[in-house]
Image: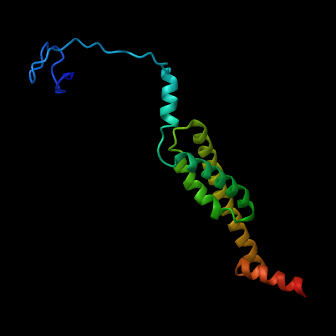
Amino acid sequence: MYCDKCGKLIDNDAKFCPYCGAEIESQELEVQETEALEAEEVEDFNETQGERGPWKAFATIGYILGLLGFILSFITIGLEIAIPGLVFSILGKKTKDEEKYEKARKGFGFALAGIIIGFIASVILGIVLGILGFDSIYEFVEYYIEQFME
């Protein structure tokens, strides 16, 4: 506690200030009534609102890119989207927000499936193009554009 006269820090049990000699009156702390939050509410607030970092946003981005990568993997262009979706989903799983964590988990699954399906579709496309005698997809597209223009 502090002396009312000189403001110096003194012992809580002191009757007189050792610095200025002033008599110390007993001070009682005033307690204000406040609405107490239940422990569960405090935990929820600390875990979600007090969270620092971009993890919540990463979870959402990972979900969106993972889903797009999965859908586009069936036409062999999903790999370019699914890989970043996988990375963002992994980072998004660091969130403490349960709803966003679930999105990140689902995005991870979509992205992983998109990568696997995209890889398989690319291999199948390569085999088919090889059987047809084309060296690349560009040669295949060029051939059919020329056929269409004639």
Q: Which image quarter is the C terminus in? A: bottom right
Horizontal and vertical percent position of residue 31: 38, 15
Residue 62 vertical position relative to residue 37 in the rendered view, above or below: below
| Residue 124 placement: quadrant | bottom right
Q: In this orientation, does residue 19 appear?
A: yes
Q: Is 52 left or right of 3, judged from the image as shown? A: right
Q: Which image quarter is the N terminus in? A: top left
Q: In this orientation, does residue 133 appear?
A: no
Q: Is 137 left or right of 30, judged from the image as shown? A: right
Residue at the location (50% across, 21% down)? 37
Q: Is 147 left or right of 104, judged from the image as shown? A: right
Residue 118 vertical position relative to residue 67 in the rendered view, above or below: below
Name the one closer to the observer, 138 or 21: 21
Residue at the location (9% across, 19% down)? 21
Q: Is 34 left or right of 25, judged from the image as shown? A: right
Name the one closer to the observer, 127 or 93: 93
Horizontal and vertical percent position of residue 96: 51, 38
Residue 81 vertical position relative to residue 10 in the rendered view, above or below: below
